[in-house]
Protein backbone atom coordinates (compact mmCIF):
# COMPACT_ATOMS: atom_id res chain seq x y z
CA UNK A 1 0.00 0.00 0.00
CA UNK A 2 1.63 3.20 -1.20
CA UNK A 3 1.58 6.74 0.11
CA UNK A 4 3.01 8.64 3.01
CA UNK A 5 0.47 9.06 5.78
CA UNK A 6 -0.72 12.42 7.05
CA UNK A 7 -3.23 13.74 9.58
CA UNK A 8 -4.83 17.16 9.28
CA UNK A 9 -6.75 18.71 12.17
CA UNK A 10 -9.50 21.29 11.84
CA UNK A 11 -8.17 24.74 12.71
CA UNK A 12 -4.54 23.84 12.12
CA UNK A 13 -2.27 24.69 9.19
CA UNK A 14 -2.72 22.47 6.17
CA UNK A 15 -6.36 21.61 6.76
CA UNK A 16 -8.24 22.28 3.48
CA UNK A 17 -9.95 25.66 3.80
CA UNK A 18 -12.78 24.68 1.45
CA UNK A 19 -13.72 21.81 3.74
CA UNK A 20 -13.31 23.88 6.91
CA UNK A 21 -15.97 26.28 5.61
CA UNK A 22 -18.50 23.50 5.02
CA UNK A 23 -21.13 22.14 7.39
CA UNK A 24 -19.99 19.58 9.98
CA UNK A 25 -16.36 19.58 8.89
CA UNK A 26 -14.49 16.53 10.25
CA UNK A 27 -12.23 17.17 13.23
CA UNK A 28 -9.42 15.15 11.65
CA UNK A 29 -8.62 14.05 8.11
CA UNK A 30 -6.48 10.93 7.79
CA UNK A 31 -4.84 10.41 4.44
CA UNK A 32 -2.12 8.85 2.39
CA UNK A 33 -0.51 10.49 -0.56
CA UNK A 34 -0.12 14.22 -1.17
CA UNK A 35 -2.11 16.48 1.16
CA UNK A 36 -1.61 19.31 -1.35
CA UNK A 37 -4.16 17.57 -3.59
CA UNK A 38 -6.87 18.68 -1.16
CA UNK A 39 -7.25 21.98 -2.97
CA UNK A 40 -10.75 23.06 -4.05
CA UNK A 41 -11.82 20.73 -6.85
CA UNK A 42 -14.82 19.28 -8.64
CA UNK A 43 -16.71 16.39 -7.07
CA UNK A 44 -18.03 13.85 -9.57
CA UNK A 45 -20.36 11.18 -8.22
CA UNK A 46 -22.92 8.76 -9.55
CA UNK A 47 -24.40 5.31 -9.38
CA UNK A 48 -22.49 2.23 -8.31
CA UNK A 49 -24.51 0.14 -10.74
CA UNK A 50 -23.78 2.60 -13.50
CA UNK A 51 -25.11 2.23 -17.02
CA UNK A 52 -22.93 2.70 -20.11
CA UNK A 53 -24.45 6.18 -20.34
CA UNK A 54 -23.45 7.07 -16.78
CA UNK A 55 -19.94 5.70 -17.17
CA UNK A 56 -19.47 7.48 -20.48
CA UNK A 57 -20.58 10.82 -19.06
CA UNK A 58 -18.32 10.28 -16.05
CA UNK A 59 -15.28 9.63 -18.20
CA UNK A 60 -16.07 12.59 -20.45
CA UNK A 61 -16.48 15.21 -17.73
CA UNK A 62 -13.86 13.88 -15.30
CA UNK A 63 -11.30 13.77 -18.10
CA UNK A 64 -12.27 17.24 -19.25
CA UNK A 65 -11.90 18.65 -15.74
CA UNK A 66 -8.55 16.95 -15.17
CA UNK A 67 -7.20 18.14 -18.52
CA UNK A 68 -8.12 21.66 -17.46
CA UNK A 69 -6.11 21.40 -14.24
CA UNK A 70 -9.04 20.77 -11.89
CA UNK A 71 -8.69 18.15 -9.16
CA UNK A 72 -11.39 15.48 -9.42
CA UNK A 73 -12.90 14.34 -6.12
CA UNK A 74 -14.97 11.20 -5.71
CA UNK A 75 -15.66 8.30 -3.40
CA UNK A 76 -13.58 5.39 -4.69
CA UNK A 77 -16.62 3.10 -5.02
CA UNK A 78 -17.26 0.88 -8.02
CA UNK A 79 -19.15 2.44 -10.90
CA UNK A 80 -19.03 6.18 -11.51
CA UNK A 81 -16.61 6.97 -8.66
CA UNK A 82 -13.83 4.75 -9.95
CA UNK A 83 -14.54 5.76 -13.55
CA UNK A 84 -14.02 9.41 -12.57
CA UNK A 85 -10.69 8.63 -10.91
CA UNK A 86 -9.42 6.61 -13.86
CA UNK A 87 -10.44 9.26 -16.37
CA UNK A 88 -8.62 11.94 -14.38
CA UNK A 89 -5.49 9.77 -14.18
CA UNK A 90 -5.59 9.07 -17.92
CA UNK A 91 -5.49 12.83 -18.53
CA UNK A 92 -2.51 13.25 -16.22
CA UNK A 93 -4.59 14.98 -13.56
CA UNK A 94 -4.89 14.65 -9.81
CA UNK A 95 -7.75 12.96 -8.04
CA UNK A 96 -8.87 12.46 -4.46
CA UNK A 97 -10.71 9.39 -3.18
CA UNK A 98 -12.75 9.94 -0.01
CA UNK A 99 -13.28 6.68 1.85
CA UNK A 100 -16.01 5.29 4.06
CA UNK A 101 -13.40 3.40 6.08
CA UNK A 102 -9.84 4.03 7.22
CA UNK A 103 -7.67 5.59 4.52
CA UNK A 104 -5.31 2.64 4.84
CA UNK A 105 -8.08 0.09 4.29
CA UNK A 106 -8.62 -1.01 0.71
CA UNK A 107 -12.33 -1.02 -0.09
CA UNK A 108 -13.54 -2.25 -2.50
CA UNK A 109 -10.89 -4.92 -2.15
CA UNK A 110 -9.98 -4.95 -5.82
CA UNK A 111 -9.26 -1.21 -5.84
CA UNK A 112 -5.74 -1.50 -4.40
CA UNK A 113 -4.02 -0.81 -7.73
CA UNK A 114 -6.28 2.17 -8.47
CA UNK A 115 -5.62 3.79 -5.10
CA UNK A 116 -1.87 3.31 -5.57
CA UNK A 117 -2.13 5.01 -8.98
CA UNK A 118 -3.98 7.92 -7.37
CA UNK A 119 -1.17 8.36 -4.87
CA UNK A 120 1.57 7.96 -7.51
CA UNK A 121 -0.05 10.70 -9.61
CA UNK A 122 0.08 13.23 -6.79
CA UNK A 123 -3.42 12.68 -5.44
CA UNK A 124 -4.51 11.18 -2.16
CA UNK A 125 -6.87 8.82 -0.38
CA UNK A 126 -8.53 10.40 2.67
CA UNK A 127 -11.04 9.67 5.39
CA UNK A 128 -12.31 11.06 8.67
CA UNK A 129 -12.24 7.52 10.04
CA UNK A 130 -9.11 6.51 12.00
CA UNK A 131 -6.53 4.14 10.58
CA UNK A 132 -7.40 0.49 10.26
CA UNK A 133 -11.18 0.81 10.64
CA UNK A 134 -13.17 -1.34 8.21
CA UNK A 135 -16.30 0.03 6.52
CA UNK A 136 -19.52 -0.07 8.51
CA UNK A 137 -23.13 0.83 7.87
CA UNK A 138 -23.64 4.58 7.69
CA UNK A 139 -20.00 5.48 7.07
CA UNK A 140 -20.46 5.99 3.35
CA UNK A 141 -23.35 8.40 3.72
CA UNK A 142 -21.31 10.35 6.28
CA UNK A 143 -18.31 10.58 3.98
CA UNK A 144 -20.43 12.13 1.22
CA UNK A 145 -20.41 15.49 3.04
CA UNK A 146 -16.60 15.45 2.82
CA UNK A 147 -16.71 14.84 -0.93
CA UNK A 148 -19.03 17.84 -1.32
CA UNK A 149 -17.10 19.93 1.21
CA UNK A 150 -13.78 19.59 -0.60
CA UNK A 151 -15.32 20.73 -3.89
CA UNK A 152 -16.52 24.02 -5.32
CA UNK A 153 -19.28 22.11 -7.06
CA UNK A 154 -20.65 18.59 -7.23
CA UNK A 155 -21.48 17.01 -10.59
CA UNK A 156 -23.96 14.14 -10.47
CA UNK A 157 -23.67 12.06 -13.61
CA UNK A 158 -26.29 9.41 -12.86
CA UNK A 159 -28.59 8.62 -9.95
CA UNK A 160 -31.69 6.50 -9.52
CA UNK A 161 -34.36 6.63 -6.84
CA UNK A 162 -33.60 6.13 -4.04
CA UNK A 163 -29.93 7.05 -4.22
CA UNK A 164 -27.15 7.75 -1.73
CA UNK A 165 -25.98 10.38 -4.20
CA UNK A 166 -28.71 12.66 -2.84
CA UNK A 167 -26.81 13.00 0.44
CA UNK A 168 -23.86 14.40 -1.49
CA UNK A 169 -26.13 16.88 -3.27
CA UNK A 170 -27.71 17.88 0.04
CA UNK A 171 -24.29 18.43 1.61
CA UNK A 172 -23.21 20.58 -1.33
CA UNK A 173 -26.30 22.75 -1.02
CA UNK A 174 -25.87 23.10 2.74
CA UNK A 175 -22.31 24.27 2.14
CA UNK A 176 -23.49 26.82 -0.44
CA UNK A 177 -21.92 24.98 -3.35
CA UNK A 178 -23.26 24.39 -6.84
CA UNK A 179 -25.00 21.12 -7.73
CA UNK A 180 -24.60 20.18 -11.39
CA UNK A 181 -26.53 17.33 -12.98
CA UNK A 182 -26.30 15.47 -16.26
CA UNK A 183 -29.85 14.86 -17.57
CA UNK A 184 -30.85 11.29 -18.31
CA UNK A 185 -33.53 9.38 -20.13
CA UNK A 186 -36.99 9.76 -18.64
CA UNK A 187 -37.55 6.03 -19.13
CA UNK A 188 -34.31 4.93 -17.46
CA UNK A 189 -34.66 4.07 -13.74
CA UNK A 190 -30.99 4.96 -13.30
CA UNK A 191 -31.76 8.57 -14.28
CA UNK A 192 -34.90 9.20 -12.24
CA UNK A 193 -32.92 10.70 -9.36
CA UNK A 194 -30.84 12.90 -11.63
CA UNK A 195 -33.89 14.25 -13.39
CA UNK A 196 -35.63 14.84 -10.07
CA UNK A 197 -32.68 16.99 -8.95
CA UNK A 198 -33.00 19.02 -12.13
CA UNK A 199 -36.67 19.56 -11.41
CA UNK A 200 -35.67 20.83 -7.96
CA UNK A 201 -33.33 23.43 -9.45
CA UNK A 202 -29.94 21.78 -9.99
CA UNK A 203 -27.88 23.21 -12.86
CA UNK A 204 -28.12 21.08 -16.03
CA UNK A 205 -24.94 20.08 -17.85
CA UNK A 206 -26.27 19.43 -21.32
CA UNK A 207 -23.06 19.41 -23.38
CA UNK A 208 -19.34 20.11 -23.32
CA UNK A 209 -19.80 23.82 -23.95
CA UNK A 210 -22.01 24.10 -20.87
CA UNK A 211 -19.49 22.17 -18.81
CA UNK A 212 -16.57 24.29 -19.99
CA UNK A 213 -18.46 27.48 -19.14
CA UNK A 214 -19.21 26.21 -15.64
CA UNK A 215 -15.59 25.16 -15.10
CA UNK A 216 -14.39 28.59 -16.18
CA UNK A 217 -16.75 30.29 -13.73
CA UNK A 218 -15.81 28.01 -10.85
CA UNK A 219 -12.06 27.94 -11.51
CA UNK A 220 -11.08 31.28 -13.08
CA UNK A 221 -7.40 30.34 -13.37
CA UNK A 222 -7.67 27.31 -15.62
CA UNK A 223 -5.16 25.95 -18.05
CA UNK A 224 -7.60 27.05 -20.71
CA UNK A 225 -5.28 26.08 -23.54
CA UNK A 226 -5.71 22.47 -22.41
CA UNK A 227 -9.50 22.47 -22.68
CA UNK A 228 -10.22 20.28 -25.66
CA UNK A 229 -11.26 21.99 -28.88
CA UNK A 230 -13.25 20.59 -31.78
CA UNK A 231 -10.84 19.09 -34.31
CA UNK A 232 -12.81 19.40 -37.51
CA UNK A 233 -13.89 15.75 -37.46
CA UNK A 234 -17.37 16.69 -38.68
CA UNK A 235 -15.98 17.94 -41.97
CA UNK A 236 -14.35 14.54 -42.59
CA UNK A 237 -17.52 12.51 -42.10
CA UNK A 238 -19.63 11.22 -44.94
CA UNK A 239 -23.32 12.10 -44.96
CA UNK A 240 -24.17 8.49 -44.08
CA UNK A 241 -21.82 8.62 -41.09
CA UNK A 242 -23.38 11.85 -39.86
CA UNK A 243 -26.85 10.30 -40.05
CA UNK A 244 -25.60 7.11 -38.37
CA UNK A 245 -23.96 8.97 -35.48
CA UNK A 246 -27.00 11.17 -34.87
CA UNK A 247 -29.16 8.05 -34.64
CA UNK A 248 -26.81 6.15 -32.34
CA UNK A 249 -26.33 9.20 -30.12
CA UNK A 250 -30.07 9.16 -29.49
CA UNK A 251 -30.22 5.41 -28.81
CA UNK A 252 -27.89 2.43 -29.37
CA UNK A 253 -29.18 0.07 -32.05
CA UNK A 254 -28.59 -3.38 -33.50
CA UNK A 255 -27.42 -3.53 -37.11
CA UNK A 256 -30.85 -4.70 -38.28
CA UNK A 257 -32.53 -1.58 -36.92
CA UNK A 258 -29.80 0.67 -38.38
CA UNK A 259 -30.47 -0.90 -41.76
CA UNK A 260 -34.21 -0.35 -41.39
CA UNK A 261 -33.97 3.24 -40.13
CA UNK A 262 -31.44 4.30 -42.78
CA UNK A 263 -33.12 2.25 -45.52
CA UNK A 264 -29.89 0.48 -46.43
CA UNK A 265 -29.42 -3.12 -47.46
CA UNK A 266 -27.81 -5.46 -44.92
CA UNK A 267 -24.39 -5.70 -46.61
CA UNK A 268 -24.08 -1.91 -46.92
CA UNK A 269 -25.06 -1.47 -43.27
CA UNK A 270 -22.46 -4.01 -42.11
CA UNK A 271 -19.78 -2.22 -44.13
CA UNK A 272 -20.80 1.22 -42.81
CA UNK A 273 -20.74 0.00 -39.20
CA UNK A 274 -17.43 -1.82 -39.65
CA UNK A 275 -15.74 1.21 -41.19
CA UNK A 276 -17.14 3.51 -38.51
CA UNK A 277 -16.06 1.15 -35.73
CA UNK A 278 -12.54 0.88 -37.19
CA UNK A 279 -12.36 4.69 -37.25
CA UNK A 280 -13.38 4.88 -33.60
CA UNK A 281 -16.67 6.58 -34.42
CA UNK A 282 -18.86 3.82 -33.05
CA UNK A 283 -18.46 1.00 -30.56
CA UNK A 284 -20.20 -2.33 -30.28
CA UNK A 285 -21.72 -3.26 -26.93
CA UNK A 286 -21.68 -6.75 -25.51
CA UNK A 287 -25.36 -7.20 -26.38
CA UNK A 288 -24.61 -6.57 -30.06
CA UNK A 289 -25.96 -3.02 -30.24
CA UNK A 290 -23.89 -0.18 -31.65
CA UNK A 291 -23.41 3.17 -29.93
CA UNK A 292 -21.06 6.15 -30.01
CA UNK A 293 -18.34 7.07 -27.51
CA UNK A 294 -18.51 10.40 -25.72
CA UNK A 295 -15.83 12.66 -27.10
CA UNK A 296 -17.08 15.47 -29.31
CA UNK A 297 -20.07 16.76 -31.20
CA UNK A 298 -21.17 15.62 -34.61
CA UNK A 299 -23.95 16.53 -36.96
CA UNK A 300 -24.80 18.80 -39.80
CA UNK A 301 -23.64 22.40 -39.63
CA UNK A 302 -25.92 24.36 -37.36
CA UNK A 303 -27.68 21.29 -36.04
CA UNK A 304 -25.03 19.37 -34.18
CA UNK A 305 -26.10 16.86 -31.57
CA UNK A 306 -24.19 15.62 -28.57
CA UNK A 307 -22.59 12.24 -29.08
CA UNK A 308 -23.77 9.33 -27.01
CA UNK A 309 -21.80 7.23 -24.58
CA UNK A 310 -20.31 3.82 -24.05
Image: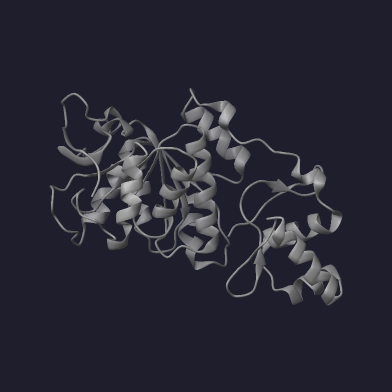
Q: Nearer the viewer, residue 54 or 268?
A: 268
Q: Position of residue 13 (x, y in %)?
A: 19, 23
Q: Position of residue 2 (x, y in %)?
A: 25, 45
In this orientation, does residue 202 appear? no
* Residue 16: quarter of image: top left
* Residue 19: quarter of image: top left
Residue 213 appears left or right of 77: right
Q: Looking at the picture, does residue 251 appear above or below residue 140?
A: below
Q: Nearer the viewer, residue 281 or 25?
A: 281
Q: Residue at x 80, y 57 (%)?
A: 241
* Residue 164: quarter of image: bottom left
Q: Which corner quadrant holds the C terminus? A: bottom right
Q: Position of residue 168 (x, y in %)?
A: 34, 48
Q: Residue at x 58, y 33 (%)?
A: 227
Q: Residue at x 25, y 38 (%)?
A: 23
In this orientation, does residue 243 appear? yes
Q: Position of residue 261 (x, y in %)?
A: 80, 70
Residue 271 appears left or right of 44: right
Q: Nearer the viewer, residue 112 or 210?
A: 112
Q: Residue at x 73, y 73 (%)?
A: 255
Amino acid sequence: MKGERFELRLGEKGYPSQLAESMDAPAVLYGRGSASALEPGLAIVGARRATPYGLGCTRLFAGRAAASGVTVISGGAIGCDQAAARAALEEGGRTVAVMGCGADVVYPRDADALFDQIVDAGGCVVSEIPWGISPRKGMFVRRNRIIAGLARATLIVEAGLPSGTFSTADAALEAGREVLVVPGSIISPESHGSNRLLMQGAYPIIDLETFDAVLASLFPILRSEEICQEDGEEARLSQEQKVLLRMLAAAPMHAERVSREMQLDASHTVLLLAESEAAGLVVRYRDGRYGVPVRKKVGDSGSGVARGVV
